[in-house]
Image (cartoon, rainbow, N blue to C red):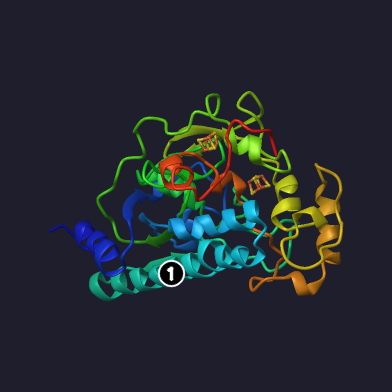
Amino acid sequence: MSLTETIKNYILGDCRMDSVGVAPASAFDGEPEGHRPEDVLPGAKSVIVFTRRIPDGVIQAAFRSREDGNADAHSIYAAYGSDLTPNMNVFFMQFNIATFIEMTFGYTAVPVPSGPMQNVTSVNKPLPVFIGPKRNAYIINSERAAYAAGLGDLAWNNMLVTKENGPRQVVGLVVTSMELEYDKPYSGPRLCDPAACGICSKVCPMHAIPPSDGEVDVVPVANGEVKVAHINANACAVASMAFRSEFAVKGEIPDLIMSNDPSDEELAEAYAKKPLSHYSLDHYPKHFCNKCMLYCPLGDWERRFSDTGLSKFDKGGPAQ
Ligand code: SF4
Ligand code: SF4
């Protein structure tokens, strides 16, 4: 068994992750300065990327909140679908994998925060780090890393999508100075066809995701490029951080931003006015919109959530 296989077996077996791949550090050459593997580890050679699916029972709790108005179900989703459990699970596994590599092979390994609560910037600038699918200010963009390691495609909603789970999984990263056997970037069939689908654009309550003929971002990844939607991150923040009472799930939320395209200054001002009681553990207010992830039809959504009666979402229905 090769050293790479030993590490992968550890991640899949001991850490109980669902998939793992390895990209060379050079796959991130197109990323901005400060967001490349060498920026967190001089001499970095490899980026190990792994995923863990979010259980259907947790995803459907979000539907109970959004479709049935059950605010407590929203807390289930927050705890098990976003902030706490999947996030912390990956968080601890990153630490374990880094320790395993250092103790077993003697190379340096850095666990890199990649989940929605592994915040690295405590001061808003003006958006917090992990709000919405655009993933502002990641240290290393985990969705692109997963694409570079062959784990799945990049979709119109900017997220990693897999045949098995669509966008409903979390991604973990470890950067190491160890040279490994590298996987090829994703080269399977395009999983997302925004012209034929467009659900993420349709369900976005802030129209932050353009339709398929709208503005495109061309992202450099693995020495190639992928086209994704140009997401209006400030608009997304209005829903994701509940800057408007209509996006409140629990408690009273003041109307702080009524514009659908707020400027950085408007956002920073509203952020400063946000009542402290609405701040979550990672120091910024959240509402967990995530509709563009929850209702994406990839990953056999219809069979899992519609045929089972777990969601009443009608993809032919009116736009949100
Ligand atoms: S909802 Fe449709 S268009 Fe949007 S990412 Fe998923 S498959 Fe692509
Ligand atoms: S659907 Fe929600 S989370 Fe997704 S881009 Fe729109 S506002 Fe943001």
Does 122 sit left or right of 148 as displayed?
right
The C terminus: image quadrant: top right
Res 136 seen here: no
Residue in the image at 20% along x and 57% along y:
5
Q: Is residue 243 above or below residue 259?
A: below
Residue in the image at 75% along x and 55% along y:
247
Q: Is residue 198 above or below residue 290?
A: above
In the displayed image of the protein, which residue is found farthest to the left?
A: 1
Does 48 sit left or right of 57 as displayed?
left
The N terminus: image quadrant: bottom left
The one of 29 and 280 positioned closer to us in this rendering:
280
Type of amino acid at the residue the image marks with label 1 = Asn
* Quadrant in the picture for residue 131: bottom right
Label 1 SS: helix
User: Which residue matches tag 1?
Assistant: 89
Q: Is residue 280 above or below residue 182?
A: below
Res 185 seen here: yes
